[in-house]
Amino acid sequence: MSMNSFGHLFRVTTWGESHGPALGATVDGCPPGVEITPEMIQQWLDKRKPGQNKYTTQRREADEVKILSGTFEGVTTGTPIQLMIENTDQRSKDYGDIKDKFRPGHADITYFQKYGIRDYRGGGRSSARETASRVAAGGLAREAIKAIAPNVQITGYMVQMGPHKINRDAFDWDQIEQNPFWVPDAQAATDWATYLDGLRKSGSSVGAIIEITARNVPAGIGAPVYGKLDTDLAAAMMSINAVKGVEIGEGMSAAMLTGELNADEIFMGNDGQPAYTSNHSGGILGGISTGQDIVVRFAVKPTSSILTTRKTITKSGEETEIITKGRHDPCVGIRAVPVGEAMMACVILDHLLLHRGQIGQNRGVIGPQS
Ligand SMILES: Cc1cc2nc3c(=O)[nH]c(=O)nc-3n(C[C@H](O)[C@H](O)[C@H](O)COP(=O)(O)O)c2cc1C
């Protein structure tokens, strides 16, 4: 498998398995001079960490990041940065009784068909443990972004759990950090708690939709056709485990709009810069950022590991049944929020660097010409 890297200039390679000694990210192309400490990265890993409340898996991983290379006296040197997180709560025995069975909805069957190896200890490389590496790389990307575009703010939150959507009229940024679901709507947080409690107790699971917004991204990053900012964002989000749909701005709903409704009208803002009456484009036109909020949504499927008996087959082709015991998230969407934020940070930084390389400063000036 040589497909473990993403990014053009800010290039991230993740490595490691869920039940091996450690996993991490090798980051090549981070600019020199970025102040970075393990604590700056740790805060984001703590957000993704399992076992923080009853709605996430009870695996107890410290998820403590170590920076092994690429820094000197607290700043990046421009050389490859090795980030490592040790696995401390593997408990492979939880998986012993499903050793020869393929779990429906998991990658066991396709990995085995392709590679001929069945790492039954929690999915190995397909396990969501891998996403810790991305979150570490994303923490570094956030610090590097500060040096280039200091006002960029990247925030993820859940907008739907199962059939329950947030009330957009009640959207409150300050609510996001106040509940276990990262939901910007206080009433939804209360309702979802009751809903998910019921599902969790019955051993079931549910899907979710997560929205990631990047505010204050300057106009002009991205490129036409194969270098579209939306192409890279979609690929980044789709690469997260359990993600089955990605949309940008109006996304799939754009199909239901007329041209009049979908066109974001342009006027001159008070700051003498172009402004828009709406943001159906999700902050991207022609693959290039408009300066509006960049808005990406992705759907995660319900956790496949459930306590209900499902039909499956064994490696030798016998039909059988399976119950996936062990410790699992009843809604993977919760812990996918910081993962989506990290992917947004890596892609935005990558495109800021590409922009700096090709253009430097935007060449098209809107406003009275001198
Ligand atoms: C943060 C996070 C946590 C996850 N936790 C679980 C889990 O506890 N149990 C499970 O069955 N799948 C979990 N998943 C999903 C699986 O990793 C994923 O479904 C599996 O690798 C198959 O890949 P696919 O769904 O992308 O096709 C999680 C995903 C994420 C992003």
Image (tube, rainbow, N blue to C red):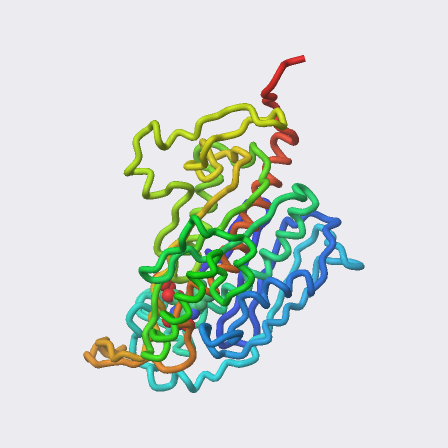
Q: Is residue 277 above or below residue 107?
A: above
Q: Is residue 248 above or below residue 188?
A: above
Task: Please name the residue shown 23% across and 81% down the image.
Answer: 321
Q: Is residue 257 above or below residue 170?
A: above
Q: How many marks?
A: 0
Residue placed most toward the observer, 356 or 149: 149
Question: Left or right of 367: which side holds 282?
Answer: left
Task: Please name the residue shown 37% across and 42% down the image.
Answer: 251
Quadrant containing the N terminus is bottom left
Residue placed most toward the observer, 206 or 36: 206
Report which quarter residue 152 is drawn in: top right
Question: Left or right of 165: which side holds 152?
Answer: right
Question: Left or right of 153: which side holds 285?
Answer: left
Query: Does residue 2 appear anywhere in the picture?
Result: no
Q: Is residue 271 above or below residue 314?
A: above
Task: Please name the residue shown 59% across and 57% down the image.
Answer: 137
Quadrant containing the C terminus is top right
Relative image position of residue 104 (x, y in whole percent): 28, 71
Query: Does residue 300 appear anywhere in the picture?
Result: yes
Relative image position of residue 348 (x, y in whole percent): 56, 45
Relative image position of residue 243 (x, y in whole percent): 39, 58
